[in-house]
Image (cartoon, helix red, strand yellow):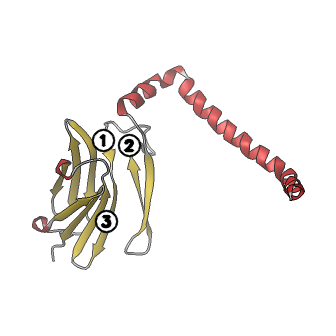
Amino acid sequence: MSDDFDIWFNRRKKYFEDFFKVIDKIFDETYNQYDSDDSNEDVDKFNEIGPLFYGYSITIGPDGKPVIREFGNLNSRKRFSETKEKELIVDVFERNNEIRIIAEVPGVSEEDIKLELSERILSIKVKVGNEEKYVKNIPLPSKVDPATLKSSYKNGILEISIMKLL
């Protein structure tokens, strides 16, 4: 059995070596980027902001097309956001006469969450002590009745239901 693996590995050894050369190059470029003198401002900003995270949420919209949303305190246009606030991961669902919003809001209590709603925009702000921890302004797909807003928060998941204006 060991001989079969050795034969298989030796046939593919060049591919593995090339792969690891590419990985080494990526690490070297990243290290050199933060090792240069002109990056000290970025390092200071990193220390001020704290942990960094970035990602995409991909869902299928009602028209069958993918909807891609960025989240985190990094984005594709700037290295860091200007504040310590982190953008929430949010999904918006439109059903019959209702709009449902599901947001991941980990590590806070329900009392720290503040919701502000107009006919077309929902703002979620989370303030812990004197520090704003999360913020998200969500454009809604339809006009809604602010008086019908209902929300629940459990295990880091905020669920919001709002009735549409007819």
Residue 63 in picture, x, y percent from top left: 39, 75
Indicate the amino acid at tag 1.
Glu
Residue 98 in view in this figure: yes
User: Residue 92: which disc?
Assistant: 3
Q: Secondary structure at mark 3?
A: strand
User: Residue 103: which disc?
Assistant: none
Q: Are marks 2 and 3 in contact (CB under 8 Å)?
A: no
Indicate the amino acid at tag 3.
Val
**Residue at x 16% of width, y 63% of height:** 119
N-term mark: 1 or 3: 1
**Residue at x 36% of width, y 29% of height:** 48
Residue 56 in picture, x, y percent from top left: 44, 55
Q: CA distance from mark 1 to mark 2?
A: 7 Å
**Residue at x 22% of width, y 54% of height:** 123
**Residue at x 41% of width, y 53% of height:** 70
Q: Are marks 1 and 2 in contact (CB under 8 Å)?
A: yes
